[in-house]
Image (cartoon, rainbow, N blue to C red):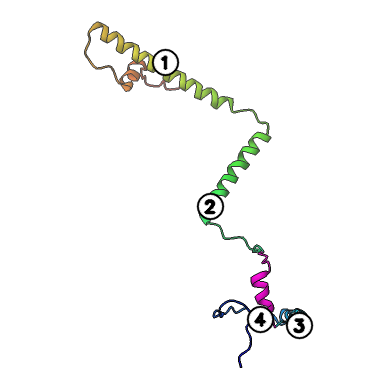
Amino acid sequence: MPRPRTHQLAARTRAITVRVMPSEFARLQAEAAQAGASVSGLAERYITRGTVRVEASRMPAPLDPALIAELKRIGNNLNQIAHALNSNLPPDTLSTAGNLRDLIHTLMRDELLLQRLRDAKERGDDSAPASPRQEFQRVVSVRPSRSQG
């Protein structure tokens, strides 16, 4: 005569295999004996009625090497910015003045060329305006250097 079923529904045909260490198996045997069930029956109760606690892995997922390289570059830039802000150094005034002077000269040259183009149109002169190189050569005269003797 077959054993009586321990469950009310249809026959169970799927098996789950779990490997444990000997100390864990001894603990499960003691709990199963206390509950009046086999180790398999106790495992079934844990799986179907119990709660499962999921623990995070102690090892983080590996990061993409390109992402790590980009984060290093960003960190380097942040360190440079923080160093510059914390050093209380004055801004490079000579470089700033030189850039400002160059900008003013460029604006003046462009404005001068624009004005000459307007004047030429008013006169009805259809000749092409001088190129910046021609303007430079017209304004700057090159002379031989004096020999120190």
Residue 40 image label: 4
Residue in the picture at 24% in, 17% down: 128
Asked which quadrant contains residue 129, the reply is top left
Q: Position of residue 146 (x, y in %)?
A: 41, 20
The residue tagged 3 is 33
Position of the N terminus, as image quadrant, is bottom right
Q: Amino acid at mark 4?
A: Ser
CA distance separating discs 1 and 4: 92 Å
Q: How far apart, in angstroms, are the residues tagged by discs 1 and 2?
A: 47 Å
Q: Name the mark nearer the viewer: 1 or 3.
A: 3
Q: Nearer the viewer, mark 1 or mark 2?
A: 2
> Looking at the image, which residue is at 60% across and 45% down?
75
Residue receiving disc 2: 67
**Hey, which quadrant is residue 121 in on the image?**
top left
Residue 108: mark in rendering: 1
Work out whether mark 3 precedes mark 2 in sequence or the reverse, and give the earlier one: 3
* CA distance for labels 1 and 3: 99 Å
